[in-house]
């Protein structure tokens, strides 16, 4: 597994080889020892999630303010997505900055998103399945969302606006600066 840093501190891209033949492929998508060696980050999964999305579905921008934070290990199992990491740490020099990583079922890629960062993705195909491990379990009182259409963040979703399918919860979420004013951003 090859792990490289991304342009936001606390985010890494992992690339693991695919072994393919006429039957399909095999991929080792998570290996703790490799992650710890490359990042110095001790990732302990306490919950695993899977979502299936149709083309144009936007999920996020989601994050946790749990005391221990919440790191995520994200990969695409079927289909393809544009995955986004958003720096929502008020004290960060990259506050409000986002990066995009394309993940697909056959790319062998995964993203490690450290504590204090926001996460979102858009599905590029119907029946796209995303699997992710999280370091702390879901806590409804400590998990929040930021409006994915926040003009101050200005994520380029890569699809026509008319194609985007956004939940009411995300569409009606506060902006990044509103969350900052509320004091509901990570303090890492």
Image (cartoon, rainbow, N blue to C red):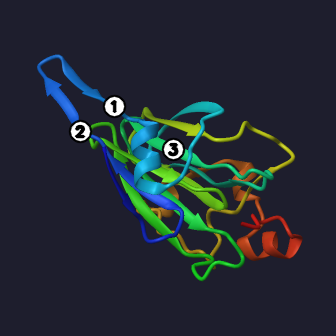
Name which of mark 1 and mark 2 comes first in the sequence: 2
Q: Which residue is mark 3?
A: 73
Which dot marks residue 17?
Answer: 2
Please tell me how crowded label 3 is: few (under 14), some (14-19), or many (20+) other residues with Cα within 10 Å. Answer: many
Q: Which residue is mark 1?
A: 28
Q: Secondary structure at mark 3?
A: strand
Q: Front-most of 162 and 148?
A: 148
**Percent of width and height locating residue 48:** 59, 31
14 shown above or below 161:
above
Q: Front-most of 24 and 186?
A: 186
Kindly give the residue lying farthest to the top in the view shown: 23
Kindly give the residue lying farthest to the left in the view shown: 22
| Mark 1 touches mark 2? (CB < 8 Å) | yes
Q: Is residue 126 left or right of residue 142?
A: left
Determine the residue positioned at 44% across, 44% down. 55
Determine the residue positioned at 62% across, 66% down. 149
**Percent of width and height locating residue 186:** 75, 64
């Amino acid at each position: 597994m090859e792990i490289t840093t991304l342009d936001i501190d606390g985010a890494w891209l992992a690339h693991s080889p695919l072994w393919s033949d006429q039957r399909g492929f095999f991929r080792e998508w998570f290996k703790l020892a490799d992650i710890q060696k490359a990042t110095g980050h001790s990732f302990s999964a306490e919950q695993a999630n899977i979502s299936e999305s149709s083309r144009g579905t936007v999920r996020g921008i989601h994050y946790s303010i749990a005391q221990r934070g919440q790191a995520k290990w994200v990969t695409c199992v079927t289909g393809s997505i544009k995955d986004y990491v958003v720096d929502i740490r008020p004290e960060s020099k990259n506050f409000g900055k986002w990066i995009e990583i394309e993940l697909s079922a056959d790319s062998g890629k995964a993203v490690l998103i450290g504590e204090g960062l926001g996460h979102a993705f858009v599905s590029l195909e119907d029946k796209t399945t995303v699997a992710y491990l999280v370091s702390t379990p879901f806590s409804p009182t400590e998990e929040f969302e930021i409006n994915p259409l926040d003009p101050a963040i200005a994520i380029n979703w890569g699809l026509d606006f008319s194609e985007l399918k956004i939940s009411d919860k995300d569409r009606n979420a506060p902006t990044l600066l509103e969350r900052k004013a509320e004091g509901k951003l990570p303090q890492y």
